[in-house]
Image (tube, grey):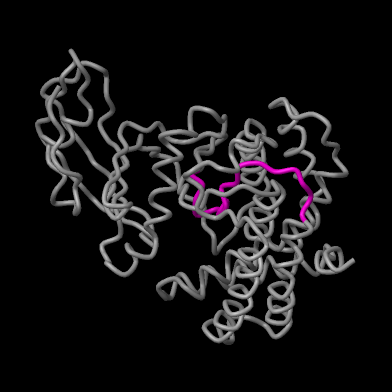
């Protein structure tokens, strides 16, 4: 087996010898003739590249292309999201084989320097197409997404081992931490409204502020059932290929009410009229898929209630992302679209009243 060179820091560091080293196995060496590296994706929290490879020796019928994730090129972004890098690597190292949610095959994962340097080599999902967060989706994609989500929640349902999993990035445990997140959320709401300006209507700004005022009691009063959460389960992190979907970007793993992931997807991905028309059926689809994984003692009425409560996840994650992420035109448009849809869902579903009651 070839010894892998150092973790590549830039795409120019991705050599044939590095790729051969990470793909080779004892007794089955791989020899690479050429590599071609091109950028893909939006690059908001990391750098993603497609590697096209030609082989001199390919004993394992390896594919002709891969997707490689490296840290962000911007030092400020990289330093801010190293916890997310650790979370994503932990997912592929310790979680992916224990759940049934569809994810790309992982060929290599390596991380060093407290997460500042890492390399994640995945199967290329082409010709699958990334969901469009700004445009939203229709019912076909929504059904694929909610059914797939059950494959994460079901196998981890109420298993206390996940509450102390070292790869968690977004779990908040203890009264002080919950109150701290509540305070940060209020601050993030104000920053978000200032940043987005006219992109947010006065009504949506009011809903955002009211929702962030309730983050602390929302977390304190959550039902005691829980599962492993993706944390940012939305269209930009889903790849669609006909009747198949693959889920990517595992940098926000957490543990909490499963309805948070479900509501976050529905609230950010569907236009309000379509969501109102289809959400009962979509939640029922998710619930049936959840039961198919072996979950018991969880009825459809409880699932619907968790969905209503979970809708606070939309303004929470959107505002935190908008307030503390690097500002871009597309990023602001995306956050505005997500908040517009999510705030409408909160009003339509009576989520704030449910929490205060």
Q: Position of residue 112 (x, y in %)?
A: 27, 47
Residue 329 point in image, percent of width and height:
43, 75
Q: Is residue 187 left or right of residue 332?
A: right
Q: Nearer the viewer, residue 257 or 44?
A: 257
The boundaries of the magenta stretch are: 222-239
The mark tally for this picture is 0
Q: Identify which residue is drawn at 46% across, 70% down.
A: 331
Would you identify the image quadrant in which residue 349 lies?
A: bottom right
Location of residue 141 with respect to 3 vertically, above or below: below
Q: Is residue 226 magenta?
A: yes
Q: Quadrant of residue 121?
A: top left
Q: Residue at x 72, y 25 (%)?
A: 294
In the image: residue 144, left or right of residue 58 = right
Instruction: Check the picture and name the quadrant holding the C terminus.
Output: bottom right
Q: Is residue 1 above or below residue 199?
A: above
Q: Nearer the viewer, residue 66 or 94?
A: 94
Can you give x and y, in whole percent of width and height, for residue 61 in the image? Answer: 27, 19
| Image side of residue 175 versus residue 100, left or right | right
Q: Position of residue 71 (x, y in %)?
A: 30, 55
Q: Residue at x 70, y 54 (%)?
A: 263
Residue 138 left/right relative to 62: right
Q: Which residue occupies the foreground of this view, 71 or 132?
A: 71
Image vertical order of residue 177 relative to residue 232, above or below: below
């Amino acid at each position: 087996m070839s010894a892998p060179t150092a973790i590549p820091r830039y795409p120019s560091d991705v050599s044939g010898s590095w790729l051969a080293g990470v793909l080779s196995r004892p007794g089955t060496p791989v020899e690479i003739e050429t590599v071609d590296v091109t950028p893909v994706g939006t690059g908001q929290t990391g750098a993603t590249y497609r590697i096209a490879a030609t082989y001199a020796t390919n004993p394992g019928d390896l594919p002709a292309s891969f997707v490689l994730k490296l840290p962000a090129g911007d030092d400020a972004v990289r330093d801010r999201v190293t916890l997310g890098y650790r979370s994503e690597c932990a997912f592929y190292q310790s979680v992916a084989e224990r759940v049934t949610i569809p994810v790309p095959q992982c060929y290599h994962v390596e991380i060093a320097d407290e997460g500042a340097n890492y390399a994640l080599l995945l199967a290329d999902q082409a010709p699958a197409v990334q969901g469009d967060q700004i445009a939203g989706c229709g019912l076909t994609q929504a059904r694929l997404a909610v059914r797939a989500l059950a494959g994460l929640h079901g196998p981890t349902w109420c298993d206390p081992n996940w509450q102390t999993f070292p790869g968690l990035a977004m779990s908040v445990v203890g009264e002080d931490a919950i109150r701290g997140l509540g305070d940060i959320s209020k601050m993030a709401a104000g920053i978000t409204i200032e940043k987005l300006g006219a992109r947010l209507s006065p009504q949506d700004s009011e809903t955002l502020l009211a929702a962030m005022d309730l983050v602390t009691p929302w977390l304190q009063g959550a039902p005691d059932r829980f599962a492993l959460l993706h944390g940012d389960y939305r269209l930009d992190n889903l790849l669609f290929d006909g009747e198949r979907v693959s889920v990517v970007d595992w940098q926000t793993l957490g543990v909490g009410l499963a309805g948070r992931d479900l509501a976050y997807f529905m609230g950010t991905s569907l236009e309000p009229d379509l969501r109102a028309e289809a959400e009962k059926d979509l939640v029922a689809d998710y619930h049936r898929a959840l039961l198919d994984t072996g979950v018991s003692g969880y009825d459809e009425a409880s699932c619907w209630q968790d969905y209503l409560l979970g809708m606070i996840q939309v303004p929470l994650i959107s505002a935190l992302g908008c307030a503390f992420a690097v500002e871009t035109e597309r990023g602001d448009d995306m956050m505005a679209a997500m908040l517009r849809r999510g705030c409408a869902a909160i009003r339509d579903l009576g989520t704030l009243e449910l929490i205060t009651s």
